[in-house]
Image: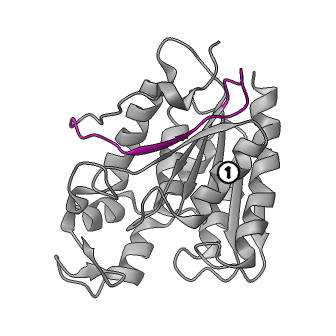
Amino acid sequence: MPPFDAAAAPLVRNPRGERLACSWVTGAPGSPACVVIGHGLTSDRERPWSQALSTALAERGVGSVRVAFSGNGDSEGRFEDSTITKEVDDLGALLDALAGRERRPLAYVGHSMGGAVGLLRAAQDDRIRALVSLAGMVHTAEFVERLFGHLAPGDPMLDKPHCPFGLALRDDLTRHDTLAERAADVAVPWLLVHGTADDVVLPRDSRDAHARAPAGSQLVELAGVDHSFTGAGLASMVDAVVPWLVERLTSAR
């Protein structure tokens, strides 16, 4: 199996033909392992937590790719069209580009709504050999009503003018309602990490998913840590995730 080489990074387009911007980081020479890192709602591929993960993984010899889902960051597409369903397709397109005709030890790390994307993709796509959910969204209808129920279409989300609230997002989150029951379909090693001070995606989302996940999944709660793993929470998250991923990717070869 060829090594994961960032210098040979492919152009990735989703099923709509929209280019997905990616940050590629090569691991140790000869290592085929790769971790795909997906961001959350109103975010992009260059957040401190995701850059810290890429750096720490590279130090352990594991390559990574941080993807900006369509309509986010400098990827093509409209933010107003961004939904969990669409981003599941985006992730599938990136996995297609990574896999080609070869199979490699491959993991996915998703934050917030990106965690919901990972849950749904891993439940149907056996190319993902290990899954990490960081403050992963599970109760999607509750989330959109609690945070954005007061917004009209076009209003900025979380005070970000470039992230207008749209009916497509609201309807998709409402239609999914909750992903808790889908947790039982995740048949790969699964690590759920959540800060106890998270007031964006509540810790019970991870608790409810973990309660329904197959035996062997692991829930790590970080005391006093917020949604974005800021401050000391960043090192705590990296320390929980990176050794776990390295062990699973090494054993998956």
The question of residue 50 being in magenta is answered with no
Question: Residue 252 sits in which quadrant?
Answer: top right
Residue at the far front in the pictured view: 7
Residue in the picture at 79% in, 41% down: 60
Q: Which residue is mark 1?
A: 55
Compared across the picture, whether 66 is left or right of 59 comes to: left
Q: Residue at x 61, y 63 (%)?
A: 49
Is 189 placed left or right of 6 in the picture? Answer: right
Q: Quadrant of the N terminus?
A: top right
Residue sitting at 58 percent across and 73 percent down? Answer: 228
Check disc 1: other Cα within 10 Å, few if <14, some if 14-19, many if 20+. Answer: some
Query: Where's residue 131, x and y in %?
Result: 64, 44
- Amino acid at dot 1: Thr
- Dominant secondary structure of the magenta stretch? loop
- Residue furthest out toward the bottom: 150
Q: Is residue 76 visible?
A: yes
Provide the secondary structure element on which disc 1 rests.
helix
Left or right, 1 with reference to 162: right
Which region of the structure is painted magenta?
16-33
> Is the image coloured rainbow, by chain, by secondary structure, or in one colour?
one colour
**Residue 3 x, y percent position in the rendering:** 64, 20
In terms of depth relative to the viewer, which is nearer, 26 or 232?
26
- In the image, residue 68 above or below residue 90: below
Q: Residue at x 24, y 40 (%)?
A: 18
The tally of labels here is: 1
One can see residue 215 in this view: no
Rendering coords of residue 106 (x, y %): 62, 32
Instruction: Looking at the picture, tell me which residue is in the foreground, 19 or 177.
Output: 19
* The one of 226 and 118 positioned closer to us in this rendering: 226
Residue 165's x, y, as percent? Answer: 24, 73
Quadrant in the picture for residue 253 = top right
19 falls in the magenta region: yes
